Every structure is written in C-alpha cells, then in structure tokens.
Image (cartoon, grey):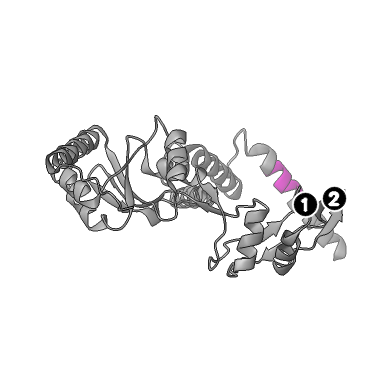
Amino acid sequence: MASVVIQVPRGDAQKRKKRLIQELIDLLKTYNVIALADLTGLSSKGLQDIRKELRGKVVIKVAKNTIKRLALEQVKDVHPNIDKLEPYITGSKAILLTNDNPFKVQKLLDAKKVAVPAKPGQVAPNDIVVPAGNTGLNPGPILGELQRAGIPTKIEKGKITIPKDTVIVKAGEVVKEEHANALKRLEIFPFQVGLTIDVVYAEGDIIEGKYLKIDEEKTLQDLQTAASYALNLAVYIGYVTKETLPTLLAKAHQEAINLSVFIEYPTKETLPLLIAKAQREALALKKLAEKE
C-alpha cells in the first residue's frame, strides 16, 4: 500500500509561524530574565514533568532556532543587549522565561532532574550500585544477564534475590551493554537529565551558565572568613564603623589604663592596679635585701 503524505497548506504554515513568533515576543516582553537551556538527552515526558514542577515560576518554550532569532529581533527596544543571546542559539535549546533571580532558577532546575536508564558508552558520574533484596523477577534467561553484568544472585521463594549491595560500575568507568541491560531489567535508572542553562540574559547582562552553579555552603564560609578578616583589619588600623566601634572603644580604654599604670597616674580604675604594682615591687625589694 502506497504511503500518503499530508502536506500542510503553505498559508496555514505561515500563519502558525507568525502566531508562534508573536506568542514568543509577548512572553519576551513580559519577563526580565531570559535563558537558553540545553535539551540534550531530555525526553518529551521529562520536559513535561519539569514544566509541571516549575509552573508559576518559570515558563519553558520550545521553538525552532529561526523563530527564536526572529522573536529576539523584535524585543531589542525592551531588552538592551538582547542580541548578545543570538550566538548561543544553536542545537536543541529551550527558552526559559522568569522574573526570578537566575541563580535561584538554576538551583530549581538542578532540583528537578529526571531519572533515566543507563546507556552503553556513558561514563558513570558516581558509583552505580545494585541494592540487595528481592527483585520480584522469576528465574530464567535474566539470571545470565545479571551474572554477565557482575551481579550476584540466588533464588529465594521462587524469585531472584540479590544477596548484597553490588557496585557494577565505578565512578568514571564506562557503562557496558551488559550493565545497561541488567539495570533496565531491574528498573534502576542511575542517570539524571534535566534542563541545563547555557546562558542567561538578566537586565542587560549576559551570564554564562557555568557561573550560575554556586556551592552555597562554601560561599557562606568564604563570606564569613572575609568578614572576619575585614573586621580584624578595621580594628587594627582604627577604622570606625558600627561593627568596630565597641571593640575600638574597649581597646582604647584598655590602652589608657595601661598607660596610666605605666606613668603611675592614679584614677578610680588604676588605683587598685597601682597598689598591686607597688606591693609586687616592695616584695621584690624585700627579697633582694634578704639575699644581701
């Protein structure tokens, strides 16, 4: 039977293209933060799941690169320097639109990864572990598949059981076909894919995605260390601020007392110290006299 090719009338295709461009233009004018995110390895279902999770926070649009460029061309008056995004419009990328902080958006995306099966040839970012327990699978050809992948097995109550946690691929090693087949059989999906921001436009600035990934704990520690160094330096040079004033006053007070004691100037604060100093000196003179 001959196949039938249904062609969309050229006029309808042009109308649809114009409608898509206008829709994207309207969105670009609405949001201040515009990002391009890589779709590589992400399935349609995975993208829909991420869309659902980010609803109300981030709008995700997928369109042909020509449509993206045409839409960007129409919003230059709203977003200065938006044309700097154009060199990044390559390959398969989605447009992300939001009014939120781009660093926060990146954190949201990192938290919305989708688990996917391992494929032969992939490099494991972490150890791939097959946990101990009853697999619920019946004995049969699958036993050979698991054994070829280096997974120990035994039969308990008519089901295949894995007696102990087993690392079948170590971090940095390549996943082999037998590993991928066994993991799929066991419904273990060790890899995660999601949207990865390549570049983001925010208030006229272009930020590459690699600068959006921040180790918050380390950054906080660095800020605390820097603040401590700055406070110590300000106190050392006598620079007065709201934070250094109590320490500087305490330091000046103590130095004034030390000076008063050194020059033997009696005050309410120094008198007990001067008396104690005189007593120590008297005792020292007494011991010296006794030796003579």
Please name whichever residue, 55 or 218, is drawn nearer the observer in this view of the structure: 55
Query: For numbered disc 1, what is the local secondary structure?
Result: loop
**Label 2: how many Cα within 10 Å (few below 14, some 14–19, many 20+):** few
Amino acid identity at mark 2 = Gly
Q: Which residue position is annotated with label 2? A: 158
Q: Which residues are magenta?
A: 274-279
Q: Residue at x 27, y 58 (%)?
A: 90
181 sits to left or right of 21: right
Find out whether the residues at labels 1 and 2 contact each other: C-beta distance under 8 Å.
yes
Where is residue 59, by image quadrant?
Answer: top left
Disc 1 from disc 2: Cα separation: 7 Å
Q: Residue 29's x, y, as percent? A: 20, 35
Q: Residue 51's x, y, as percent? A: 42, 37
Q: Is residue 127 visible?
A: no
Amino acid identity at mark 1 = Asn
Q: Residue at x 47, y 44 (%)?
A: 46
248 sits to left or right of 204: right
Identify the residue at the far top of this view.
Answer: 56
Please name whichever residue, 31 or 67, is drawn nearer the observer in this view of the structure: 67
Q: Which residue position is annotated with label 1? A: 138
- The overriding secondary structure of the stretch rendered in magenta is helix
260 sits to left or right of 64: right
Q: Is residue 39 visible?
A: yes
**Label 1: how many Cα within 10 Å (few below 14, some 14–19, many 20+):** some
Q: Residue 229's x, y, as percent? A: 49, 52
Where does the C terminus fall, quadrant-wise?
Answer: bottom right
Query: For numbered disc 2, what is the local secondary structure?
Result: loop
Q: Residue 18's x, y, as percent? A: 15, 39
Q: Residue at x 64, y 52 (%)?
A: 188
Q: Earlier in the sequence, mark 1 or mark 2?
A: 1
Q: Residue at x 58, y 64 (%)?
A: 124
- Asked if the magenta segment contains residue 149, the reply would be no
